[in-house]
Amino acid sequence: MDYDLDYDPEILEKIFMVGWHDGIIGKLVKEYKYNSVRALADVLAEFLDGALPVFSEEIVLVPLPTITSHIRQRGFDHIGVLTRKLAKRRGWKMEKCLVRNKNSVQVGASGDERRKQAKKAYRLNKKVDSDKYYLLLDDVWTTGASMREAATIMKKGGAEKIMGVVLAVNRGKDKRSSVGRSASERVKDKIDDSVR
């Protein structure tokens, strides 16, 4: 299935997803994330495991960092827990290569706001290896700004092979979201952005 997600294959080689945000996966993510139903971590890790192919390369799993205030509110780092569980299922190494610079909240922000916030959100926490395959993990892809910026930072830090995986993809309440939009609409947006 072609998800038609807007990403640059020069930065992110591939994106994998489990399901749609407005479906059962989205409901499970909301329960896990906002209602702190920690038991869902195993179920969601199993879904992630099933959505990913068998890789011949050694994979390093990298969680996109959660805002510190959200970890305090929820009582746990939902992405960190999920990343550890998936790493254990697959026998992969987990590395926290990224840390948050800013605690800006993306939920409810417009697509343009999300893209601006993401550009300042992360920095490298440790050296990355150009020979390793990195798989970035996040819960929801709305505009893809967080995943793209995290991958860009890792690329600038020396990582050459980066992929991403998300649990749920938002179908595009943001008119600039790429999901379900034609290639010509996305090209027009890129041209419009370059002339601004």
Image (tube, helix red, strand yellow):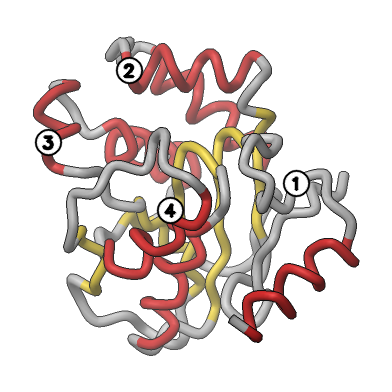
Disc on the earlier residue, 3 or 1: 3
Kind of residue sitting beneath label 2? Tyr
The residue tagged 3 is 69
Name which residue lies at 29% across and 34% down.
Answer: 81
Residue 67 placement, left or right of 15: left
Select label 4 or label 1 by which is in front.
4
Neighbour class for label 4 at 10 Å: few (<14), some, many (≥20)? Answer: many
Select label 1 or label 2 by which is in front.
1
Q: Is residue 190 above or below residue 137?
A: below
Q: How far is mark 3 from mark 1, CA to CA?
A: 30 Å
Please tell me whether mark 3 sits on a helix, a strand or a loop: helix
Kind of residue sitting beneath label 4? Arg
The image quadrant of residue 67 is top left
Please tell me whether mark 2 sits on a helix, a strand or a loop: helix
Mark 1 near mark 2, Cβ–Cβ under 8 Å? no
Q: In the rendered view of the protein, which quadrant contains the C terminus?
A: bottom right
Select label 4 or label 3 by which is in front.
4
Pinpoint residue 24: horizontal percent, then vertical percent.
Answer: 64, 14
Q: How far is mark 2 from mark 4, CA to CA?
A: 20 Å
Mark 2 near mark 3, Cβ–Cβ under 8 Å? no
Q: Nearer the viewer, residue 77 or 169?
A: 169
The residue tagged 1 is 179
Q: What label does residue 114 carry, if any? A: 4
Q: Is residue 39 above or below residue 91?
A: above
Please tell me whether mark 4 sits on a helix, a strand or a loop: helix
The image quadrant of residue 83 is top left
Q: Is residue 163 above or below residue 84?
A: below
The residue tagged 2 is 34
Disc on the earlier residue, 2 or 3: 2
Disc on the earlier residue, 4 or 3: 3
Disc on the earlier residue, 4 or 1: 4
Neighbour class for label 3 at 10 Å: few (<14), some, many (≥20)? Answer: few
